[in-house]
Amino acid sequence: MRLFLLTALVFFISAPIYALELSGVLTQGGLVIGTATPGSKIELDGQQVELTDEGHFVFGFGRDHGAAALLKITTPESKTEEYNLVIRQREYNIQRIDKLPGKMVSPPEGTWERIASDRTLVANARENSTSTPHFLRGFIRPAEGIVSGVYGSQRILNGKPKQPHYGVDYAAPEGAPVMAPADGIVRLAHADLYYTGGTIIIDHGHGVSSTLMHMSALHVEAGQRVKQGALIGAVGSTGRATGPHLDWRMNWRDARIDPMTLVPELTE
């Protein structure tokens, strides 16, 4: 067994002897795509990672992932290598607001059942993921517009931490087109979730998914296959939104991924 230490923020490594390649961003919110010898066994922090017949795989790190991760690869010949990944820890924009009316801090009691039902719908939509690696083609912006909200930011209202913002927001006119950021299968198309309004979840394979929120119109339905760049909806202000915008979020399984790490032009 050989042990490696990987600390590069943006990295690409190749180990021809063991047919291993990795590329991605070693940071909280980062997604890593790799290639290994077909038939290998891949584990991240003890969790098995799916491998295609061609040897492709993917994994990611959530907003609050610790500073270290262990990648273990066992080849079909039972040769094992371990990679200690050093995960960059990020600083997020935290806003504290006090002396707010209670209704601005917590949802009305009568909405709790609906919110719980919505969460179940979303969890079920992400539960099963296709083995087709649509994510290998890469990602594009799902909408045009100024980036008005970023990954990881959080508000603390009356001393109560609210859920962090896990995506990127585009401020765009009502009705502006929303495109599929990558190929995939629509797992959820719902016009009226309590928090996120018109919502679409697209499965890009191996646990990678996109969620697009607050839309005023949906042009796809659950089970439909979509191609990158296909029109899927329209920008809106549905759900808990103060103005028209698109909120694009990504997941690898339960880990929340920062779309800005996958589409560099989002930072322009």
Image (tube, helix red, strand yellow):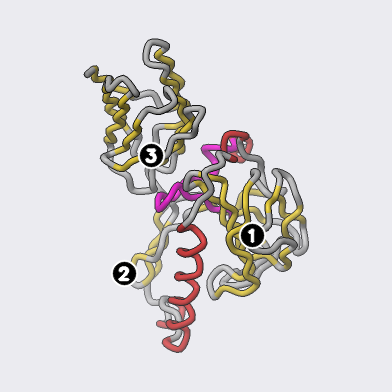
Question: Looking at the picture, which amino acid does disc 3 mark?
Answer: Val
Indicate whether 8 appears above or below 251.
Answer: above
Circle on res. 100:
none
Q: What's drawn in magenta, residue-wise?
A: 248-263
Q: In the drawing, does residue 54 fall left or right of residue 71?
A: right
Tell me the element at label 1. loop
Indicate left or right for 143 with 35 as reference: right
Q: Residues within 10 Å of mark 2 (few under 14, many from 20)?
A: few
> Sequence-wise, which precedes: disc 1 or disc 2?
2
- Residue at image mark 1: 223
x then y, percent, for residue 22: 44, 25
Figure quadrant of residue 194: bottom right
Side of 107 where 161 appears, left or right? left
Where on the picture, by quarter, is residue 217? bottom right
What amino acid type should be assigned to the residue bearing mark 1?
Gly
Residue on which disc 2 sits: 159
Q: Which residue is mark 3?
A: 49
The residue sitting at 57% across, 34% down in the picture is: 136
Q: Is residue 100 above or below residue 6?
A: below
